[in-house]
């Protein structure tokens, strides 16, 4: 048995919907020391028991699950995806439901034919039996009821033994009551339609499972590994360790996360990031499991084992998200907890009170049964979970990892959004924006001196200068006697002449500047640039201005956030005020705060929470960790391969694409609309039938037909969330 200090994981056979989760919480919770220790993954049929103060006994847990009518076994990743028992669990309910429908239809035909052809000859009480139903029709109706309730009767009996009424008990009482008063047709119809509603719910979960499998489970099972002698061999991905070399040919999927060491290609990353365009890759670039190598053969050094790959993390995050229920789910569950027993008591009152006041016992007993059918909260219970699962899948296909149902709804409730500057509103790396040569020097000469000195430096500004020189075709000449001046710049000898590069402060220390130079420096800084001064021993050659460029889409994204209902967009940065002001003006944010330490960002988020109530924070998930944790919703930006960012934030954007933010807000509000539509429609139908019942116009079959029809509608309404146009495009691209 697993160590008690580690979470215990079980595969639960029969775990398909929220009703089973509720039964397991009630049955297993007391055994493990509380329901809060239980985590459920419906899509994987997995139950996890987290360690607590009391040691959990696996055997006791298995027995507790068995008492709920389900079967459990210790989780093994190596278990086959589908066994014979698993196939019956997946398809047996559908077959039984179909059998129930066919038997019920045969009963109706037999009932009508025998009643019309032989009733006159045999008499109303002859072969027709009690209530005028022919015995042959009764048998067919009975077999149809047994088929429909094959899996429901045991659950209803356990509900009686636990004194906890649920949907199964309600519908069982309704069917038995209908049989008791001779309404065989009504009983068979109710049984079939209830079984159909459960089958539809099971189908909706299966649809979500298939969608996740299609979107995420795309890494090939084998990798082409290269040994020390250069020989290639296909092995299972689980056998490949980090640091191995693998070959990926054009058209193949990348089996493991790694870094390219040879070859160039373009990679379709849509299965993981949702990017619509393939990304060019060359030696030194990362590739991720599940993506598609399009153009050239590449040699890759693996950086993670299969279990630690990005796609494995994505799958695990989406699975874990099922256990974190949204506010709507929690409300529906709490409502149903009180609603069901209340309506049962009301049904008892309907059956007993009017007859005591002179009403007909049979008539009001029938109306009580109708009320029990109406009480079945099937459509209401499944309305929210299906919507949440569909939203999680759609978001994952768009490169947005949402870590639970609670976070699906939050983006749609945000009033303010705080954005980090570097790497979020900006591209995250400095670029040369302007060359300002002085004293007769040209741009080429100025850049040649700067690049020659900075070739020795690892500073981001130095690398940007060298990169810009290469783009302009300048090959730096090696310098001599290079010396770094800590925190200020560097000196060297180039072609026999002393040269230097440094900051504004270094210029002042060398006393080589004048008033005109200082004015130009101030002007460049006001534009949001970091200025590097280049000079020789006796004069200044010019200035190189560098800036972290604003993302091209940043302004449009901020406008779209406002249009989506975000009242206040603020930029928080540790950069200097002139740079922050320039970026703020270009991006169109409502407010900016500069020169902030991590604690200052936390304070700023707390102030926003006081003003707006619900505030989101977008950052890199590491440096902005305090603010991300304090905000109502933390969003990590562009975290491909950054495990720390994925763990810090509530939502992780898998690619550096700001356009995901307004999409996320709009999509969250769409999810909220669908959930509200489903809840309101479910309750409205029930309210109408309650009124019809009291006026004597409702019937058993009409009530269950309405409830089943409502179940169908809420399922299909929820699954519309999978039909996001961008999502569909990504799915199609993934299979090209």
Image: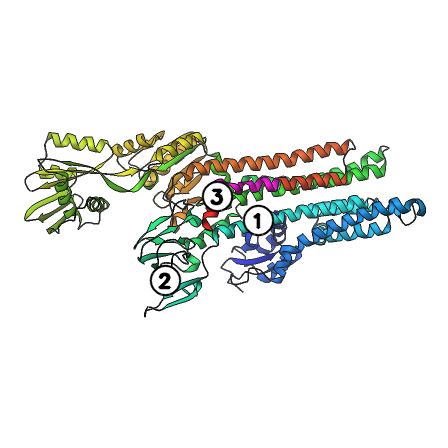
Side (left or right) of 68 relative to 254: right
Of the numbered discs 2 and 1, the one sitting upstream in the chain is 1
Give the CA separation, mark 3 to mark 2: 31 Å
Q: Nearer the viewer, residue 326 or 550?
A: 550
Was residue 723 drawn as part of the magenta stretch in this picture? Answer: yes
Q: Residue at x 33, y 32 (%)?
A: 587
Label 3 CA crowd tier, 10 Å (few <14, some 14–19, many 20+): many
Circle 2 sits in a helix, a strand or a loop, which is it? strand
Residue wearing tag 1: 207
Instruction: Give coordinates of residue 554: x percent, y percent.
Output: 35, 35
Label 2 CA crowd tier, 10 Å (few <14, some 14–19, many 20+): many
Circle 1 sits in a helix, a strand or a loop, which is it? helix
Is residue 618 at least partly visible in the picture?
A: yes
Q: Nearer the viewer, residue 283 or 171?
A: 283
Task: Please give the range of residues in magenta.
Answer: 714-729
Instruction: Give coordinates of residue 564: x percent, y percent.
Output: 45, 32
Give the CA separation, mark 3 to mark 1: 15 Å
Label placed on residue 246: 2
């Amino acid at each position: 048995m697993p160590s008690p200090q580690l979470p215990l994981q079980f595969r639960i056979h029969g775990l398909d919907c929220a009703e089973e989760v509720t039964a397991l919480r009630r049955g297993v919770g007391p055994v493990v020391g509380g329901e809060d220790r239980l985590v459920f993954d419906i899509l994987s049929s997995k139950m996890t028991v987290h360690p607590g103060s009391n040691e959990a006994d696996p055997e006791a847990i298995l027995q507790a699950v068995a008492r709920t009518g389900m079967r459990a076994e210790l989780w093994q990743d190596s278990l086959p995806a589908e066994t014979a028992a698993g196939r019956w669990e997946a398809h047996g309910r559908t077959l039984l439901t179909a059998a129930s429908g066919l038997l019920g239809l045969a009963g109706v035909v037999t009932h009508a034919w025998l009643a019309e052809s032989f009733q006159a000859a045999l008499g109303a009480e002859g072969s027709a039996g009690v209530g005028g139903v022919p015995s042959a029709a009764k048998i067919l109706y009975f077999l149809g009821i047994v088929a429909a309730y094959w899996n429901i009767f045991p659950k209803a009996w356990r509900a009686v033994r636990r004194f906890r009424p649920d949907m199964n008990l309600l519908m069982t009482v309704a069917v038995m009551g209908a049989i008791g008063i001779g309404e065989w047709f009504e009983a068979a119809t109710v049984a079939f339609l209830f079984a159909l509603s459960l089958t539809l719910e099971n189908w909706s979960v299966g649809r979500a499972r298939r969608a996740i499998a299609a979107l995420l489970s795309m890494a090939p099972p084998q990798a082409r590994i290269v040994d020390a002698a250069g020989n290639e061999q296909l092995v299972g991905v689980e056998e490949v360790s980090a640091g191995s070399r693998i070959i990926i040919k054009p058209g193949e999927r990348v089996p493991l996360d790694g870094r390219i060491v040879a070859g160039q290609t373009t990679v379709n990353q849509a299965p993981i990031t949702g990017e619509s365009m393939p990304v060019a890759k060359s030696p030194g670039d990362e590739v991720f499991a599940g993506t598609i190598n399009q153009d050239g053969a590449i040699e890759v050094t693996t950086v993670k084992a299969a279990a630690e790959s990005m796609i494995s993390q994505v799958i695990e995050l989406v699975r874990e998200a099922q256990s974190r229920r949204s506010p709507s789910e929690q409300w529906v569950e709490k409502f149903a907890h009180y609603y069901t027993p209340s309506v049962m008591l009301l049904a008892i009152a309907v059956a007993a009170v009017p007859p005591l006041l002179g009403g007909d016992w049979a008539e009001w007993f029938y109306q009580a049964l109708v009320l029990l059918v109406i009480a079945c909260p099937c459509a209401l219970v499944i309305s929210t979970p299906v919507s949440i699962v569909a939203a999680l899948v759609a978001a994952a296909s768009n490169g947005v990892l949402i870590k639970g149902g609670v976070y699906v709804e939050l983006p749609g409730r945000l009033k303010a959004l705080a954005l980090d500057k570097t790497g979020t509103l900006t591209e995250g790396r400095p670029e040369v924006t302007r060359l300002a040569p002085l004293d007769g020097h040209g741009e080429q000469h100025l850049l040649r001196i700067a690049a020659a000195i900075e070739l020795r430096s690892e500073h981001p500004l130095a690398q940007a200068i060298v990169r810009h020189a290469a783009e302009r075709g300048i090959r730096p000449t090696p310098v001599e006697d290079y010396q770094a001046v800590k925190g200020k710049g560097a000196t060297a000898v180039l072609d026999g002449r002393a040269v230097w590069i440094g900051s504004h402060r270094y210029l002042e220390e060398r006393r080589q500047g004048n008033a005109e130079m200082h004015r130009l420096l101030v002007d460049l800084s006001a534009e949001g640039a970091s200025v590097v001064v280049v000079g020789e021993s006796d004069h200044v050659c010019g200035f190189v201005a560098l800036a972290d460029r604003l993302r091209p889409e940043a302004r449009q994204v901020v406008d779209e956030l406002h249009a989506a209902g975000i009242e206040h967009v603020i930029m928080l940065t540790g950069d200097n005020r002139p740079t922050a002001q320039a970026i703020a003006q270009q991006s169109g944010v409502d407010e900016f705060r500069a020169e902030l330490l991590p604690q200052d960002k936390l304070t700023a988020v707390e102030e926003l929470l006081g003003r707006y109530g619900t505030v989101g924070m977008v950052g890199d998930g590491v440096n902005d960790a305090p603010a991300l944790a304090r905000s109502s919703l933390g969003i990590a930006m562009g975290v491909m391969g950054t495990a720390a960012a994925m763990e810090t934030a509530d939502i992780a954007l898998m690619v550096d694409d700001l356009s995901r933010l307004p999409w996320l807000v709009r999509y969250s509000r769409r999810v909220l609309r669908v959930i509200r539509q489903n809840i309101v429609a479910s309750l409205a139908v029930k309210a109408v039938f309650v009124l019809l019942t009291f006026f004597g116009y409702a019937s058993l079959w009409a009530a269950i037909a309405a409830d089943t029809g409502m179940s169908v509608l809420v399922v299909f309404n929820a699954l519309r969330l999978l039909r996001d146009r961008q999502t569909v495009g990504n799915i199609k691209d993934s299979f090209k």
